[in-house]
Image (tube, rainbow, N blue to C red):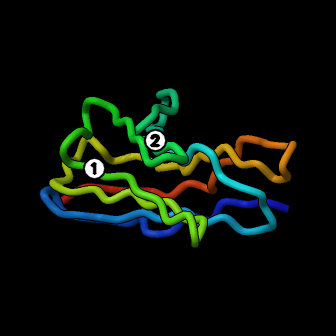
Amino acid sequence: QVQLVESGGGLVQPGGSLGLSCSVSGSIFSINTMGWYRQVPGNQRELVAVINSDGGTNYADSVKGRFTISRDNARNTAYLQKNSLKPEVTAVYYCNEYIHTTQRDWGQFWGQGNQVTVSS
């Protein structure tokens, strides 16, 4: 069974940096889009950043220039590096991927979510 396993959340001071990673466990054929979303209580989950299979990226306006998404296709892992962190980015961050489980079948998968708190 395919699962996304996230790591790297935690507490960081304003202005600091934090990295998240998301690895795929289980047998897959290929990964299409890899992305990160975040959610605060009472709000909808929102897109933070996404990277396509060809390396093309897209970011929410609020994180452009401060967050960087990348992927290692050999390791089936996505990364989100966050710099110059502000308290308003405090949220639970979820990895999201569109994965071909076989050459013909595909599905959308979510990670378990990691709390990121920016506070002094």
At horizontal 54% and vertical 62% (from top left) the residue drawn is 22
Q: Quadrant of residue 30?
A: bottom right
Identify which amino acid the numbered label 2 is placed on: Val
Instruction: Give the x, y percent position of residue 45.
Output: 51, 33
Does residue 86 appear left or right of residue 89 in this picture?
left
Disc 1 crowd rating (10 Å Cα; few below 14, some 14-19, many 20+) is many
Between tags 2 and 1, which lies in front? 2
Quadrant (top left, top right, bottom left, bottom right) of the N terminus: bottom right
Question: On the image, numbered disc 2 is attached to which residue?
Answer: 50
Q: Considering only order in the chain, which callout, 1 or 2, is on the residue closer to the N terminus?
A: 2
Measure the C-alpha gap from mark 2 to mark 1: 11 Å
Identify which amino acid the numbered label 1 is placed on: Phe
Q: Quadrant of residue 70?
A: bottom left
At horizontal 48% and vertical 41% (from top left) the residue drawn is 37
Does residue 18 appear left or right of residue 77 in this picture?
left
At horizontal 51% and vertical 27% (from top left) the residue drawn is 44
For residue 67, the mark is 1
Disc 2 crowd rating (10 Å Cα; few below 14, some 14-19, many 20+) is many
| 12 up-or-down from 68: above or below | below
Q: Quadrant of residue 4?
A: bottom right
Element type where label 2 sits in the image: strand
Instruction: Give the x, y percent position of residue 101.
Output: 81, 53
- The residue closer to the viewer here, 116 or 48, is 48
